Image (cartoon, helix red, strand yellow):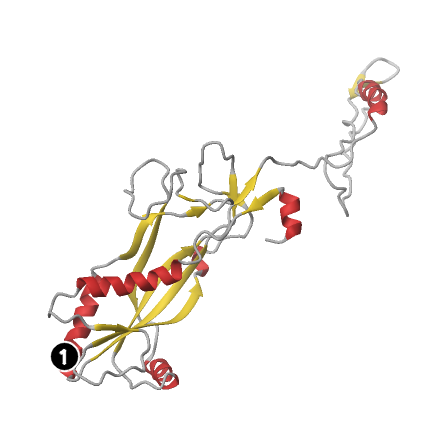
């Protein structure tokens, strides 16, 4: 946030709350496949370099992140709003809405024999199909002083139980998508000097939170006010102008329009005052 924004809002921002989430999602994907494999004693090797080819009969699962895109359906305006964080004695915090990202992964396998590679690809597909969320934990917020807390103001613990009223939960979903054509995949393999392999594409949806803004109060601009020495005279004029209008005969024909009201704030431009419709006098 720029310095002029800090001066305008009168607050001090903290560090980014969740810029590490993209890397944590990739690590969670590695841990999922590594800890779930129980087919043979030897766990397949997890590799991010799709050009790597083992020299022996070692099986390899390639996890390659190839694209990030902001979700346009969950995009919010970047105005500051109150953050869902309640820390006793710390006041109110503000932040901008999180950036909702779609992270796309290319998953492919390698084995010396094609049938073994196909069986490994089927196991990978079913394992990831049974996992709808890679990360499910309390949402992390970092205060301006550097303390990580959850939405209830407690010290942030990724293993904490997801219980309690008002607890914001961070959930990273995982879904199988058809994002790459065969031609697109061939271009990726060619650019990385890797042989073509059958592949799967997955989308992980996550949110990135920026810094929290701690404020001590709210400044309200009321614009330029009238001279306080002229207020009594203005009141007297207003009171006199609100008397009903009457003819010499004493018949009341109506009341005058209300006095012109000056709203607080900046002076408006290109605004024309509208006059009330005049009533026809009785003959």
For image coordinates 78% across by 43% down, the residue present is: 272
**Left or right relative to 208: residue 200:** left
Q: Residue 220 location in percent, x, y?
A: 66, 36
At mark 1, the secondary structure is: helix
Q: Residue at x 70, y 37 (%)?
A: 221
Q: Quadrant of residue 245?
A: top right
Which quadrant would the C terminus be assigned to in this image? top right
* Quarter-of-image position of residue 265: top right
- The residue at 25%/62% (across/down) is 31
> Depth check: 230 or 16 in front?
16
Tell me which corner region of the image, top left, top right, bottom left or bottom right, holds residue 213: top right
Closest to the observer: 157 or 209?
157
Q: Position of residue 112 (x, y in %)?
A: 17, 84
Residue 281's x, y, as percent?
81, 26
Q: How many marks can you see?
A: 1
Question: Does residue 236 lie above or below 193 as drawn?
Answer: above
Q: Residues within 10 Å of mark 1 (few under 14, many from 20)?
A: some
Q: From the viewer's perspective, tell me whether residue 84 is left or right of residue 228.
A: left
Q: Is residue 36 left or right of residue 107?
A: left
Residue at the disc numbered 1: 116
Taking 185 as reference, is 104 above or below it?
above
Q: Of all residues shown, which one is farthest toward the right?
A: 248
Location of residue 200 in the rendering, given as x and y in whole percent from the top left corner = 27, 73
Q: Is residue 122 above or below residue 2?
A: below
At x 43% / y 61%, what residue is drawn? Answer: 71
Question: Which residue lies most toward the top here?
Answer: 250
Q: Is residue 54 left or right of residue 231?
A: left
């Amino acid at each position: 946030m720029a310095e002029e924004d800090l001066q305008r809002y009168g607050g001090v921002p903290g560090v980014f709350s969740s810029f590490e989430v993209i890397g944590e999602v990739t690590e969670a994907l590695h841990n999922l496949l590594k800890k779930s494999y129980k087919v043979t004693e030897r766990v397949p090797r997890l590799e991010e370099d799709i050009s790597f080819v083992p020299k022996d009969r070692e099986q390899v699962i390639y996890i390659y992140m190839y694209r990030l895109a902001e979700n346009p359906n969950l995009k919010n305006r970047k105005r500051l709003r109150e953050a869902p964080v309640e820390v006793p004695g710390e006041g109110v915090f503000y932040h901008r809405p999180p950036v909702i990202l779609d992270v796309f992964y290319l998953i492919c396998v390698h084995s010396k024999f094609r049938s073994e590679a196909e069986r490994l690809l089927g196991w990978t597909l079913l394992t990831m199909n049974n996992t709808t969320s890679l990360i499910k934990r309390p949402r992390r917020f970092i205060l301006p002083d550097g303390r990580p807390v959850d939405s209830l103001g407690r010290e942030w613990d990724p293993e904490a139980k997801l219980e309690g009223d008002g607890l914001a939960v961070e959930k990273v979903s995982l879904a199988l998508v058809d994002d790459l054509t065969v031609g697109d995949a061939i271009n990726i393999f060619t650019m990385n000097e890797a042989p073509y392999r059958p592949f799967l594409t997955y989308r992980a949806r996550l949110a990135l939170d920026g810094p929290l803004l701690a404020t001590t109060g709210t400044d309200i601009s009321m614009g330029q006010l009238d001279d306080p020495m002229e207020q009594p005279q203005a009141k007297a004029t207003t009171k006199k102008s609100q008397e009903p209008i009457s003819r010499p005969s004493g018949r009341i024909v109506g009341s005058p329009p209300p006095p012109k009201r000056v709203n607080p704030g900046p002076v408006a431009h290109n605004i024309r005052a509208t006059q009330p419709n005049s009533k026809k006098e009785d003959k």
